[in-house]
């Protein structure tokens, strides 16, 4: 079970001064890398592809961030916090915050 999933609000803990401390929503998780909406933007020069309907030019998109450099955002405390997994009586596994033990 991944600690961070698509749709989670995360805080970026490390990186350059433009993105460190910022919060955003996870767009997708690929292995050990996450893509956060409107953060860690890079510019890519793309060729036009008329078959796919793409126009060429400079495209700005999100670059990946390693999963160890983000923490799940806890709205109750307003900070990023560590995550643990807990097994319920019926055998179902849920994610909980380590500090408070509340379910996510």
Image: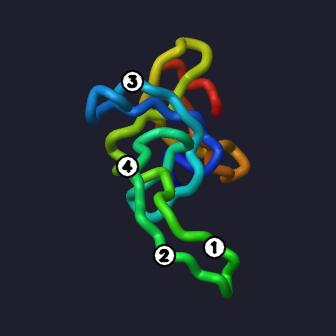
- The label shown at residue 36 is none
> On the image, which quarter does residue 16 sit in?
top left
Position in image of residue 95 (x %, y %)? 58, 40
Tell whether label 2 touches label 1 (CB within 8 Å): no
Residue positioned 47% across, 18% down in the render: 79
Q: Nearer the viewer, residue 92 or 55?
A: 55
Q: Mark 4 or mark 1: which is in front?
A: 1
Q: Is residue 60 left or right of residue 15?
A: right
Position in image of residue 50 (x %, y %)? 65, 83
Location of mark 1 (residue): 54
Q: CA distance from mark 3 to mark 2?
A: 34 Å
> On the image, which quarter does residue 75 sit in?
top right
Q: Residues within 10 Å of mark 4 (few under 14, many from 20)?
A: some
Q: Earlier in the sequence, mark 1 or mark 2?
A: 2
Q: CA distance from mark 3 to mark 1?
A: 34 Å
Q: Secondary structure at mark 1?
A: loop
Q: Nearer the viewer, residue 69 or 48?
A: 48
**In the rendered image of this protein, does residue 30 appear above or below residue 52?**
above
- Callout count: 4
- The label shown at residue 47 is 2
Q: CA distance from mark 4 to mark 1?
A: 26 Å
Q: Earlier in the sequence, mark 3 or mark 4?
A: 3
Q: Earlier in the sequence, mark 4 or mark 1?
A: 1
Position in image of residue 4 (x %, y %)? 52, 46
Residue positioned 67% across, 81% down in the render: 52
Q: Secondary structure at mark 4?
A: strand
Q: Is residue 12 left or right of residue 23?
A: left
Q: Secondary structure at mark 2?
A: loop
Q: Residues within 10 Å of mark 1 (few under 14, many from 20)?
A: few
Q: Nearer the viewer, residue 56 or 38?
A: 56
Location of mark 4 (residue): 65
């Amino acid at each position: 079970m991944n600690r961070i999933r698509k749709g989670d609000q995360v805080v970026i803990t490390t990186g350059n001064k433009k993105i460190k401390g910022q919060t955003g929503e996870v767009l997708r998780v690929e292995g050990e890398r996450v893509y956060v909406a409107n953060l860690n933007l890079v510019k890519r020069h793309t060729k036009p592809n008329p078959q796919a309907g793409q126009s060429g030019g400079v495209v700005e998109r999100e670059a990946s961030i390693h999963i160890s450099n983000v923490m799940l955002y806890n709205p109750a405390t307003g900070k990023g916090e560590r995550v643990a997994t807990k097994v319920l009586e019926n055998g179902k596994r849920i994610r909980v915050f380590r500090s408070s033990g509340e379910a996510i």
